[in-house]
Image: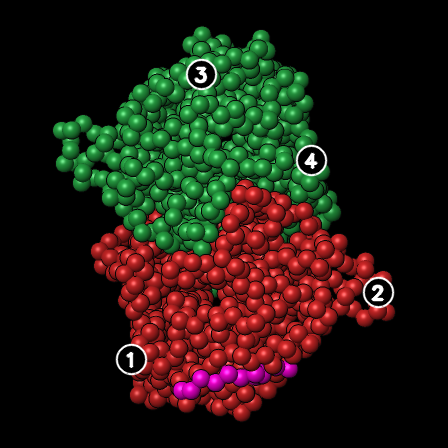
Chain colours: A red, B green
Amino acid sequence: MFYLASKTLFVLPSLFTFLLVGSQGENTAMDNVATERRAEESHRQDSANLLIFIMLLTLTILTIWLFKHRRFRFLHETGLAMIYGLLVGVILRFGVHVPRNMNNVTMNCSVNASPATLLVNVSGRFYEYTLKGEVSTVKGHDVQDDEMLRKVTFDPEVFFNILLPPIIFHAGYSLKRRHFFRNLGSILAYAFMGTVISSFVIGLVMYGCVTLMKAVGQLGGDFFFTDCLFFGAIVSATDPVTVLAIFNELKVDVDLYALMFGESVLNDAVAIVLSSSIGAYQPAGDNSHTFDATAMIKSFGVFLGVFSGSLALGVATGVMTALISFCFTKLRDFPLLETALFFLMSWSTFLLAEACEMTGVVAVLFCGMTQAHYTFNNLSPDSQDRTKQLFELLNFLAENFIFSYMGLTLFSFQSHVFNPLFIIGAFIAVFLGRAANIYPLSFLLNLGRKNKIGSNFQHVMMFAGLRGAMTFALSIRDTATYARQMMFSTTLLIVFFTVWVCGGGTTPMLSFMSIRVGVDSDQDSSQVTVSDGTQHRNTKHESAWPFRIWYNFDNTYLKPLLTHSGPPLTATLPACCGPLARCLTSTQAYENEGHQHNDDSDELVLNDGNATMYGDVTVSTDASGTLTTNHKHLSASTMGITSEEALDQELAFGEHELVIRGTRLVLPMDDPPEPTVTLPPPPTSPPPFSDPFSDPFSDPFSDPRRNRL
Amino acid sequence: MFYLASKTLFVLPSLFTFLLVGSQGENTAMDNVATERRAEESHRQDSANLLIFIMLLTLTILTIWLFKHRRFRFLHETGLAMIYGLLVGVILRFGVHVPRNMNNVTMNCSVNASPATLLVNVSGRFYEYTLKGEVSTVKGHDVQDDEMLRKVTFDPEVFFNILLPPIIFHAGYSLKRRHFFRNLGSILAYAFMGTVISSFVIGLVMYGCVTLMKAVGQLGGDFFFTDCLFFGAIVSATDPVTVLAIFNELKVDVDLYALMFGESVLNDAVAIVLSSSIGAYQPAGDNSHTFDATAMIKSFGVFLGVFSGSLALGVATGVMTALISFCFTKLRDFPLLETALFFLMSWSTFLLAEACEMTGVVAVLFCGMTQAHYTFNNLSPDSQDRTKQLFELLNFLAENFIFSYMGLTLFSFQSHVFNPLFIIGAFIAVFLGRAANIYPLSFLLNLGRKNKIGSNFQHVMMFAGLRGAMTFALSIRDTATYARQMMFSTTLLIVFFTVWVCGGGTTPMLSFMSIRVGVDSDQDSSQVTVSDGTQHRNTKHESAWPFRIWYNFDNTYLKPLLTHSGPPLTATLPACCGPLARCLTSTQAYENEGHQHNDDSDELVLNDGNATMYGDVTVSTDASGTLTTNHKHLSASTMGITSEEALDQELAFGEHELVIRGTRLVLPMDDPPEPTVTLPPPPTSPPPFSDPFSDPFSDPFSDPRRNRL
């Protein structure tokens, strides 16, 4: 796919006025052959260039492996990819020099517009040309016109249309929803209010900086207040990749993880919509770049409309996929078809959003979350693995590609504007913006939260606010003007700094801040280290009421309607809706009522740990190799508890936190509470030999895939 | 990826001479906004168009599921995809009419050549345009200029650079190599000689047909002998997809399967190189399209050079991947990295071949075969699954995309040339060409083969020679001239006919020809139904000697060097090479010597059946649910037999065919021969509970993935 991407190369802001005088009057066959040769040559070069990236990625993978093998944590794979990209950039810039080929022609023609397609009559033969974009003549730069550097430059839309969607979808698909919903209020506050605050703080600081620069004569072009705000919007999006990889590996406190992950996933969406809203800020008349209330309101309307529209679209296609996989139950027998369907539906979300002039990336994020919440439960275990692994791979490749490209572009991009004052100002602004996001909001949130966000958490969130793929993609999208070029160059430096310094410093920071590590996310979500350092078990979570309302609605209506894992609708709907409920309930759901099966393992999605839970069975082997099995499934309905009571019970249970999934109560496994049934020592008659297909729960290693043997 | 593809639209052979007079003198900001709007609008449309294809694929998947569910075998998924494509094509053609937008400008300029990049000065502003290709003015056609139809037309290079590689790689990766190597001689004969014969026969018949058409005045343009040969080359490639899906489902005789699959996979490679060689046939001077011996020899040289070069490249990168995964042993702990590496290396094969002016698709085929033979054995079980599933998915999507696009293009392509005489001639030629391939070659091969290819086999091979993706991709690649357009239209009809009629008729044909179905490929590769209908067990296979030489070389040098599954080199190399052997042998190989592990299950690659064999253990459950386990691993070296003796033993063993994998002898499981150790009734002490990690072979369900729990 990159092959074509590499064809649609980014337009160099340079101008070539060479007029090629061709060999007129040669026969057409020869012309044809020459054109074909040229096309072949171009294709050959594109392949070679793409090969450079593939080799870069291969090298990165091998080095990552080395690092993982040696447990070297100070440089993450993304940081590494950037370093390799830098090295290749240096080589291409200073080592290889391919002079720009002389096939560029400038014509001064009678056309008065720039059409999308151009037909050029060359001595009686017509050639079709398509518009690539405008080429601006930038003054004051010694632009090197190196064909090689130009060739390794991608169309920035590639990032938005090809590389970001799988990354963002994967983020949504792998959100640990339980912890996400627990901290929903705080996450939304950080992601929405925080990002907006940060954008405006950065915008204001930069405006001050730019005014100063203008005063001392350091500014080489226009830089308006809207540009400052735009800069604020693009550098406010924090990146989930690096820090969360470290968090995951160290098994950092789940609430901190949920806060950081939730914030960085959602603020990507906020930043992309915010920056496009600022771009849409077009004051009426000629007085552009001044304040205009109506334009401001319009921008705000655009923000709200695009965001909610994309959200609705993403959720809608997610729900549709869930419905399809719900109705076509037997699709489970064909994991390939199921996986293909899942992939296509998720992709169509992106396309649909783009076709409707919404933001595809945002739609894809919410689609991913919906897929994880509903569709995942309807998939066969085989497809659950396949989809998970597929998006893991796509995410990995796209991410490392972006980061290595980032490294490369520091040298290959040919119109960098590095302005020391602007760079210093930007670093200060980014720092202040992040601080203005985290500290005041945490203070406000702590007023309402039972489970306070400790100051050590706040410092880590402040420190670990790395900028990454989204910031880069937003800044490279438009580099036509002087202001945008300066932004792009500065943004690159900010990304490098945060990924290397802040990313590398996260592990020491965690230990310095005495954040607990090695926490099993399934066991310990209610224990939080608070600011005074004492362990504190809370009974109510901060977002109890939205969580409670959502949980009830979801459990009563949505889960039964969309998945096979909830209770049948007939059990959850009031009696008056009986007939409706009956016709909407699948036979499978009835079967599930008494006999719950293991489709509902929400928390399993993309759980990379070594300890795996399938359905209601928690399996672990302790150091001596003996096996502990906790095996429990109590259906809430069979126990006569409604889901609301179950929720209350969960929220009040304090000590032995009951995790509710669907209608079942699953008990966590460390120091097992009373209701946990611990299996007696292995039975003397070997169950797997007697009838391995009888009940997957009787076998602690009941990998669901084995049913397909 | 298709998004960008859809941008690089195919050039319509039509000409628009509308001159747009823009609104001169407007301010530049407005111009900028207008340009952006246009770009956005174009992007929106591209997304919408791509969405049509995604929806088509989704619909296809759901219908496939319905068919599979109902066990409806007369229409394969590819045939179905074509039907849906046709329907959408009809709707787009006759239902929707979007007038071509008026943004095309024709200029009569002073340029005398067609450069790759064009900079156009539009009232002081420069726009960059890239060359799409030449636009020819075709006479005699009422070309509809419908923007919608133009938009849903892809650049034909998309097929070669994006869609074919995963299909062809998957074919190589899933070749059942044991049966492939057994019938290597016959497969090579059919694929190479057969395809060349078929091309020339079709070419000659078509030349006769074209001469006749010229005589009766039916020919609307030039059609040279080289065009006829080119047509022969492109329609000679048979498609593995449809028939083999049916063969796989019905478990048709493995030798027939191997012959058909091997032929159709390899003849794709032959056809692509052959057609490009015919294209390269350029007689010197002005007398083009006449016979020229030197040009002929040159073409032949191109054929050999490109084919062997691509083959060498593919094998080389495959071997390199094997070496990397061999050296970085601990990479096995990170299946994601392993899978990513595998994917990138396979992709780089394609790019490398294209960059070296070889044929990427051919390189990818041999890379796939090498990966399956060596690299697969070094991968962790998890990665084996992942790579297999990944390429299965990519293959599925690409294949259905191509076939639905084929259906669509029957109506959306705007310069079809349907000539009844040519079409009838082509159908006859294709029939004759296939017959001239199968029957004479089978006769010749039967002279040498011990295990004759029965006449029923020949009839099935004749009948089931469908044309598919490769034929289509080759014919759509160049549709500039009248001859090529007529070829393309005719090719489409041939594909439709063969896929629907021959594909649908394969199941009845098999039963009519009394071909055995329901054969387990692992049990029964030496039993072949011969022409007289009696069952005949042969002791020597036809390609015994190349197979033997290859097997010995591979087993002695390559497998130990490249994989962890063979015996260590120290055991296979002569004593004089001791020191060299020792430094080339990994410690793991030594461990394997005594204690063989289950990496070597060659036949497992993409084996879709429900009965799965892991390593040396064959597991099956009979109808009553009781378990039969055959468990045997005898290391040839520990038994004191050299690999050559083992091979002899295999070839001579007749009745209870011993399958050699590496150095082990695995015995097939139906009516178990003496040396098979049948496990006693399940032991009283339950092995999986005692220590599940001790020995994977002690557990018949030793899914290797479980080691990762």
Sooner in the amino-acid sequence: mark 3 or mark 4: 4
Task: Give the residue at mark 2.
Answer: A578
* Amino acid type, label 1: Pro
Task: Give the residue at mark 4.
Answer: B71
Is residue B435 positioned above or below B286 on the image? above
Secondary structure state at the residue bearing disc 1: helix
Task: Give the residue at mark 1.
Answer: A420
- In-front residue for pair A217/A654: A654
Q: Of helix, strand and loop, which mostly describes the magenta segment?
A: loop
- Of tags 3 and 2, the one toward the viewer is 3
Rendered residue at 35%/88% (across/down): A212
Residue B143 x/y as whole percent: 64, 40
Distance of label 3 from label 2 (alpha carbons): 68 Å
Residue A401 picture quarter: bottom left
Q: How many marks?
A: 4
Residues under numbered marks 3 and 1 in contact, where contact means CB atoms less than 8 Å apart: no
Could you classify mark 4 by the number of other residues whose Cα lies within 10 Å: few (under 14), some (14-19), or many (20 or more)?
Answer: few
Residue A645 picture quarter: bottom right
Residues under numbered marks 1 and 4 in contact, where contact means CB atoms less than 8 Å apart: no
Distance of label 3 from label 1 (alpha carbons): 82 Å
Any mark on residue B296, and which?
none
- Subunit that carries the residue with mark 1: A
Could you classify mark 3 by the number of other residues whose Cα lies within 10 Å: few (under 14), some (14-19), or many (20 or more)?
Answer: some
In the rendered view of the protein, which quadrant contains the C terminus of chain B? bottom left
